[in-house]
Amino acid sequence: MKSTKTWIFIFFVGLLAAVMIIVENVSYYFFQKNLIEIEMAQLQTSAAVMSGEFSSYASFSEAEKNGVYERMRRYSAMNSVRIRVIDERFVIVSDSYLVEYGRNIINSNVINSFTTGKSISFYDRKNTNIEVAVPINGTDGSILGVLVVSKDLDEVYKNSVNDNIFTVMVAVIAVAVILVLLFERGIGKSYRKAYKIVEDVANGHTDKRIPVKGSYELRQFAKDFNNIMDRAGMLDESRQEFVSNVSHELKTPITSIKVLADSLNMQDDVPIELYKEFMQDITNEIDRESKIIEDLLSLVKMDKSAAVMNISSVNVNEMLEIVLKRLKPIAQKKNVELLFESFRPVVAEIDEVKFTLVISNLVENAIKYNVSDGWVHVSLNADYQYFYVRVEDSGIGIPKESQDLVFDRFYRVDKARSRQTGGTGLGLAIVQNIVLLHHGTIKLHSEEGTGTTFTVRIPLNYVG
């Protein structure tokens, strides 16, 4: 795979080639245009001067006898121009190239110059030829004929235009090379700094971040790298916090058991009633410890990227009725009314065991954190793509500042109350993981003193 410098070099070589082609064409056009204007002006001046030599003679034969044609031939040879003299019959009476002598010429420029008495200039782009037609006036002012002076610019282009273009191209290449070197030096410096920071991070300095500046690609790289490192830092903090919370949660019941056991051992003749009370407390703490370990194992299993999903087609209405029937005694014990409302029959592809855990946790929490004589309302609905389970209660509600944290492991809104109700702080974390395994979503809406609503959305058809 090519390095960044290689791609930069290839890019600039291609850019330089494109610029050179554009510069060459633009330069050729402007140099050519400028050259035509210069040559045209010089040719017009020369033609006017040569035409003026005939003004001293009454006829072309008299001018020829006095060496006018000879002088024009010498001028033609010295300046690489063709000079033709055409009489009033449009017959060529003199040709410096000795090619068309005595021939008739039918040329619009010649005809226009003869009839109007004005100079006519023309550039033949196809043949790269300049032609100037100037009327010849005799001694009495009458028009004797037309002087046609023409010049082929092909050789001039090869010499003058190409030389100028070569100079421009050399200048462009020199400037481009300097710009490439300066740019490469600047971008190379930025990339070297970024690579140095990456190397430092690899060596353990995980607090370092790449400055978000420089080229677009470098800024994007810096943003992505910094985001990865920030997430890695948050994950590391989360792991440390998780280990700390696990240690604390597992240690608390053990400490309680030890205190209760020591209290029994330090007393003589312990009454059977107190003994039973302490043993019941120890049993409760052991149950709590077992619940924590069970929830931890469930969470670890679902944290695996290849968590096993036992997907089957499930009648969700029947499943919810079974779960709520199981939880009804808990609701009756707290005098909480448990209601279920189904809007339509729903059959979906889900992991029944895991999704039962979702409903159990949500409804059990709604019962535990409810008020006396309260209610819990569970509803089921569906559309063509998803089914929705809504668990709404009349409980104590969740403070706004805690609503984004309730799905975190071991997070408790009220730690003292949670311990009284036997919560481990892992229930909602497990719920969220199961919902995500089903490619679903869970949303929370709560107001303190009013109640809480959880809405779960799950696809009807599971896609692995």
Image (cartoon, helix red, strand yellow):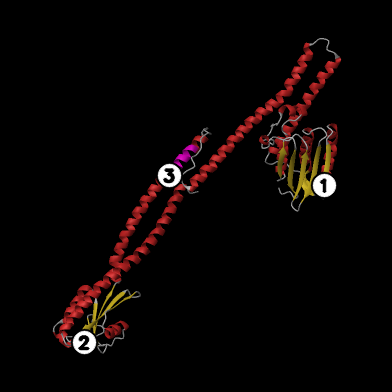
Q: Are marks 1 and 3 in contact (CB under 8 Å)?
A: no
SS at mark 3 in the image: helix
Three-letter residue code for mark 1:
Ser
Say above or below: 328 vs 58.
Answer: above
Label disc, if present, on residue 463 of the rendered structure:
none
Left/right of residue 372 with respect to residue 103 in the rendered view: right
Residue most toward the bottom? 89
- Give how far across and how far down residue 334 sits, in percent: 83, 32
- Residue at 67 percent of width and 28 percent of height: 245
- The range drawn in magenta is 186-197
Cα gap from disc 3 to disc 2, whole angstroms: 79 Å
Sequence-earlier tag: 1 or 2: 2
* Residues packed near mark 2 inside 10 Å, few (<14), some (14 to 19) or many (20 plus): few
Residue at the far top: name it. Answer: 268
Residue behind mark 1: 342
Observer-nearest residue: 319 or 174?
319
Which mark sits nearer the N-terminus, 1 or 3?
Answer: 3
* Foreground of the two, 94 or 263: 263
Q: How many marks?
A: 3
**Residue under label 3:** 188
Which residue, given by chain and number where applicable, does mark 2 sit on?
142
Q: Position of residue 117 (x, y in %)?
A: 26, 83
Inspect the image, locate mark 2, and give the three-letter code of the amino acid beneath it: Ser
